[in-house]
Image (cartoon, rainbow, N blue to C red):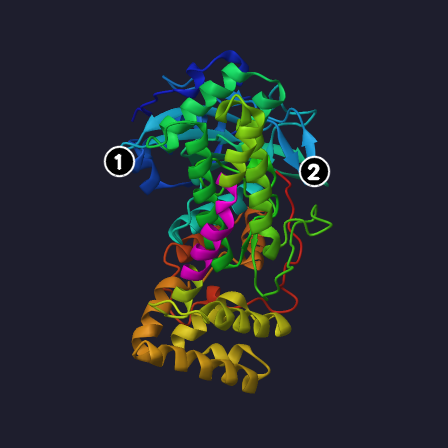
Amino acid sequence: MMLHIPFDNSYARLPDRFYARLKPTPVAAPGLIAVNAALAEALGIDPAALTTPEGLAVLAGNRVPEGADPIAQAYAGHQFGGWSPQLGDGRAILLGEVIDRDGRRRDIQLKGSGPTPFSRRGDGRAWLGPVIREYLVSEAMHTLGVPTTRALAAVTTGERIQRERAFPGAVLTRVASSHIRVGTFQYFAAREDIAALELLTQHAVARHYPQAGDALDLLDHVTAAQAALLAQWMSLGFIHGVMNTDNAHVGGETIDYGPCAFMDGYHPQRVFSSIDQQGRYAYANQPHAALWNLAQFASALLPLIDEDTNAAIEKATAAIDRFEALYRAEWLARFRAKLGLTTAEEGDRALIEALLTRMAAEEADFTRVFRGLAEGTARDEFVDRDGFDAWAADWHARLAREGQDLDDAQSRIARASPAIIPRNHRIEQAIQAAVAGDLGPFEALHAALATPFDTPPDSPFRAAPAPDEAVRRTFCGT
C-alpha cells in the first residue's frame, strides 16, 4: 500500500527570506499513537497508508514524501507583551500543502520534528504529554464547532526527551488552513521589508479572505474573525493560556495548544498557565488580549494601508475599533443560545452576567451549570440554591416574554452547551497512562469527545474532578 499525499505548496514558493528550507530530523523507532481517518480522507489521503511503515516514517519525519517541500517558517512576536524580533518554527516543519476535497488549501505540519535555525538552542522535539494534549483538545474544539488547527496523526519516536526528567518523545502531525500569524507580519514590518509585507498580504488574502481587496480589508476581516473566535472560546470556558502575537492566527483559527485549559469551576480571573504569573491571559482578559494583538497587526500593516502615516493610523484604528462591538454581539448571541433565548432584549446581558456572578461566587462548574439548564439539574451545582432560584425566576420570566415552552428552550440549550469537554484531569490521566504505555484512556476520552452534545448522562467524562483530581496548573512543555 503506497502513501500518496497530493501536495501543492504555495508558501514554499514565496522568497527564501520567508522560511528556512530543511528536512525533519529522523527519529529512532516510530510507533503509532493515532491516525485521524476522517481528516485524512478529507485531505485526499488514504488513512490506512498512514499506518504502514512508510506512513509512520513520514509522520515521524524519517521520510520526506514525494511532492513535499519542507520548510520552517519565520515569524516574530510579542510574548507576554515583550518584543522578540525573531521566533519562527523552532520545533515544527511544514511538509507542504494539499487542496482538500472541499477545495480548501490545508497545511500539513510536523510538530516536534527536530531543531531548525529558529530553535534558539532548543532541541526541536516534543514529549508525549503535549502531543496527547493538543491532539485531544484541538479535535474536541473541532467537534464543538470552533475554528481550529487539527490533529491528523500522532506517533512516538522511540527516543527519550529531556525536560524536568526524561519522557517518551512524540511527533504531532498538525493540519491548518495556514500557519500565518500576526507575528509573521511583524517579522517583516520590523525589518521594514515592504516588498515581503506586500507578498505576505497578497498570500493571506488569497488564502483566507479572497473577497478582501487590500491590507485594510484584510485587517477588517481578521478583526471580525478574532471577535467571533474569542466569543466562542468564552462561551465554552476555554482559556488559551499564551495569547502572544505569534499565536494569533490571521485566518481566525485556534492555534498552539500549550498550557490551554477548559475551566471546571468558573471564575473570570481563572489562570492555568504556569508561565502566566500576572494573569495577562486570564479567562476574562482574553478579549482584551485579542484586541491588543490586533493593534500590533494593524501597526505592521500601516505602510500598506496608506503612504501618509497619520492617515494609515486613522484608518487602522477605525478598523480595530470595530472589535468591541463585534465581540459584544457575538458574545451575547452565544450566551443567549446557552439560555435558550431566540430574541434580543435590553436586559439580556444583565441576566447572563447575573448567572455568571453567582457561578463565580461559588466557583460553580462552568460546563455543568449551562448543561444543567438544559437538563433541569443546574440548581444542584450551587450551594446557595435559593439564590439560583431567584435568578431562575428571572430567566423563566424572560422565556415567558418570548412565549417559549421550557422544553423547547432546553432543547436549544443542549445544542449550545456541551455535556463534556476535555477536562484537565482527564487529559492528565490520559497522558500519565500513555507515558506508562497504555493508550486506553487516551482512546476512550477521544471517543467520548467526538459527541460532546450527545453524551449519555451516566458517562464518567461528564463529571467534574474530585478535589484531589483537580489540575490547577498547565505547562507548555512541548
Which quadrant does the C terminus fall into?
top right
Label 1 element class: loop
Circle 2 crowding by C-alpha within 10 Å: few under 14, some 14–19, many from 20 = few
Q: Residues within 10 Å of mark 1 (few under 14, many from 20)?
A: few
Mark 1 lies on residue: 102
Query: Residue 248 lies in magenta, yes or no?
Result: no
Disc ID at residue 163: 2
Outermost residue on the bottom side: it is 386
Residue at image point 38% right, 25% down: 97
> Of callouts 1 and 2, which one flags the residue occurring earlier in the amino acid sequence?
1
- The amino acid on which the numbered mark 2 sits, given as a three-letter code, is Arg
Tell me the distance, in whole angstroms, between the alpha carbons under discs 1 and 2: 41 Å
Quadrant (top left, top right, bottom left, bottom right) of the N terminus? top left
Q: Quadrant of residue 43?
A: top left
Spot occupied by residue 312 in the image (x, y as percentages of width and height): 53, 29
Highlighted magenta segment, given as a residue range: 319-333
Seen at 73% across and 41% down, the residue is 164
Residue 334, picture quadrant: bottom left
SS at mark 2 in the image: loop
Depicted 339 relative to depicted 188: above or below: below
* Count of numbered badges drawn on the protein: 2
Q: Is residue 242 visible?
A: yes
Q: Is residue 350 left or right of residue 458?
A: right
Report if residue 332 lies within the magenta region: yes
Horizontal side of residue 112 vs 210, given as left or right: right
Q: Main secondary structure of the magenta part?
A: helix
Q: Position of residue 309 (x, y in %)?
A: 57, 25
